Image (tube, rainbow, N blue to C red):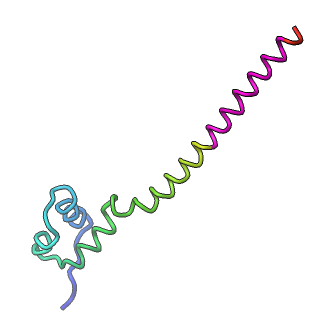
């Protein structure tokens, strides 16, 4: 028995039935799709399932950049105060 080929639109709609409309995988799979196939489609087409690794890396980068921005901002503020101090002393 050959395995059926489903168009991408069908796959995306099946994933939406589970992710957006809240239907159980077993119920959506009973519409002529195996549960295994549906879980594979969920991995491929559901952005929430593929996002966490990328999001974690992005969040770590954002935290690092915010810390660097805070440090540089503090350095700038200190330099402004020093420049104002020396401007008063020389003027």
Q: Residue at x 33, y 58 (%)?
A: 48
Front-most of 12 and 81? Answer: 81
Q: Residue furthest top?
A: 91
x, y percent for residue 72: 68, 36
Q: Residue at x 15, y 59 (%)?
A: 22
Front-most of 63 and 50? Answer: 63
Please tell me whether residue 86 belongs to the stretch shown in magenta. Answer: yes
Q: Quadrant of residue 77?
A: top right
Q: Which residues are magenta?
A: 68-88
| In the image, residue 7 above or below residue 51 | below
Give left or right: position of 86 versus 56. Answer: right
Specify the quadrant that holds the N terminus: bottom left
Q: Residue at x 45, y 62 (%)?
A: 53
Q: Quadrant of residue 20?
A: bottom left
Q: Residue at x 54, y 48 (%)?
A: 63
| In the image, residue 38 above or below residue 76 | below
């Amino acid at each position: 028995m050959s395995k059926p080929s489903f168009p991408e639109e069908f796959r995306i709609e099946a994933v939406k039935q589970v992710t957006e409309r809240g239907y159980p995988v077993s119920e959506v799979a009973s519409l002529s799709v195996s549960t295994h196939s549906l879980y594979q489609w969920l991995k491929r087409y559901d952005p929430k399932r593929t996002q966490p690794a990328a999001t974690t890396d992005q969040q770590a980068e954002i935290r690092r950049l915010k810390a660097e921005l805070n440090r540089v901002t503090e350095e700038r503020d200190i330099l402004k105060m020093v420049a104002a101090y020396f401007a008063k002393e020389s003027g």
